Image (cartoon, helix red, strand yellow):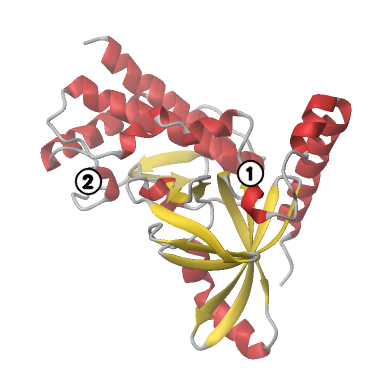
Amino acid sequence: MKTPPLIREEFYFCAMRYLSVCLIIPLVFFSCNSVDKNNPETILPGNWFVLYPVEELQTRKQEEVYAATQDSLTNLKCLKLLRFSKNGDFNQLDSISIKGTWNMKEEGVVQVAGGGHGFDRFQTRFTGYKNRVLKLTELADARGEKLKLVWHLLRIDKGNATTLFDEANNKWRYKAIKKESDNEIRERLVQMLEYYAAYFQLIADESSFFMPSRVILPFKFYQHGIGLKAFDPESKFAQLFYSTEQAKFASYVLEGAIGRASFDFKDNSSYSREYVKMLEELAKQVRKQVSSR
């Protein structure tokens, strides 16, 4: 199956934009070529955004198996933010408290272990690197078949998306170890809302789809709107807070912010761009409650 046209076109224009900058500004040109494009050990260290896989299937049986297992295979990795560190550490920001490792025991073969859901045991082969897009080829086991998936990862080394990897911007991911004040809970929510506004901006810029499961906030996403899910004490969102009582208060704060927010803007080119503005508006509403106390 070929890459969807929307994705191909988007990355064509993305690549041309970055190429133009490299040609115009000599210093940037040297920066773009500062890594050996044939040496994965110099390319992998850094921050990455998992875009999509392109499947290279050989038989009808493989096509049938992939059709039946596509969601489970792609949901494990698509649209995740990853970090390969020079010292061999690996982590995905969805599971920031889990520290995995990565290494290359043979030429071109990348192994990730203990990296959290989707990356507990991940073996892939370096396929290529061009225009800040890394290709890693995985032979995924599914129902007795080896399905060849070529994962495309975008290097995040410039622009506002780099803030998604800043330690200070990810403090909200850590579970509270003591009871927090009402204002501290609001501050945590502001951080979450601003973080996901930046995440949806990345989605709008670099992807033709989004996955609600990548968002820990208890939101339902509609055409031109955002709603609040019913409170779930077992949700990832609730587990961030010191107690169920404090998690309920956080949900109450979000409910109030949605009620006060004005979502009077539309962008027919992208729902994700609308969600950016909505999340920024909600962050503004919650911040008002912090400053007034």
Q: Nearer the viewer, residue 29 or 10?
A: 29
Mark 1 vs mark 2, foreground winner is 1
Q: Which residue lies at the image location 22% right of the left edge and 50% below the top edge? A: 232
Percent position (x, y) of residue 67? Answer: 57, 78
The amino acid marked with disc number 2 is Gln
Disc 1 from disc 2: Cα separation: 31 Å
Give the residue pinned by disc 2: 239
The residue furthest top is 292
Mark 2 surroundings within 10 Å by alpha-carbon count, few (fewer than 14), some (14 through 19), many (20 or more): some
Percent position (x, y) of residue 227? Answer: 37, 41
- Please indicate whether residue 5 sits to the left or right of residue 156 in the image: right
Q: Which residue lies at the image location 50% right of the left edge and 69% below the top edge? A: 73
Tag 2 secondary structure = helix
Q: Which residue lies at the image location 69% right of the left edge and 50% below the top edge? A: 133
Q: Nearer the viewer, residue 200 or 258?
A: 200
* Quadrant location of the C terminus in the rendered image: top left
Percent position (x, y) of residue 5? Answer: 76, 58
Residue 259 shows up from this direction: no
Give the residue pinned by disc 1: 155
Percent position (x, y) of residue 290? Answer: 27, 16
Q: Nearer the viewer, residue 97 or 193?
A: 97
Q: Check contact, mark 1 vs mark 2: CB within 8 A.
A: no
Q: Is residue 134 above or below residue 256?
A: below
Mark with earlier residue (1, 2): 1
Q: Is residue 271 above or below residue 28?
A: below
Residue 272 shows up from this direction: yes
Q: Which residue lies at the image location 44% right of the left edge and 55% below the top edge? A: 101
- Please indicate whether residue 34 sits to the left or right of residue 182 in the image: right
The amino acid marked with disc number 1 is Arg
Number of on-image labels: 2
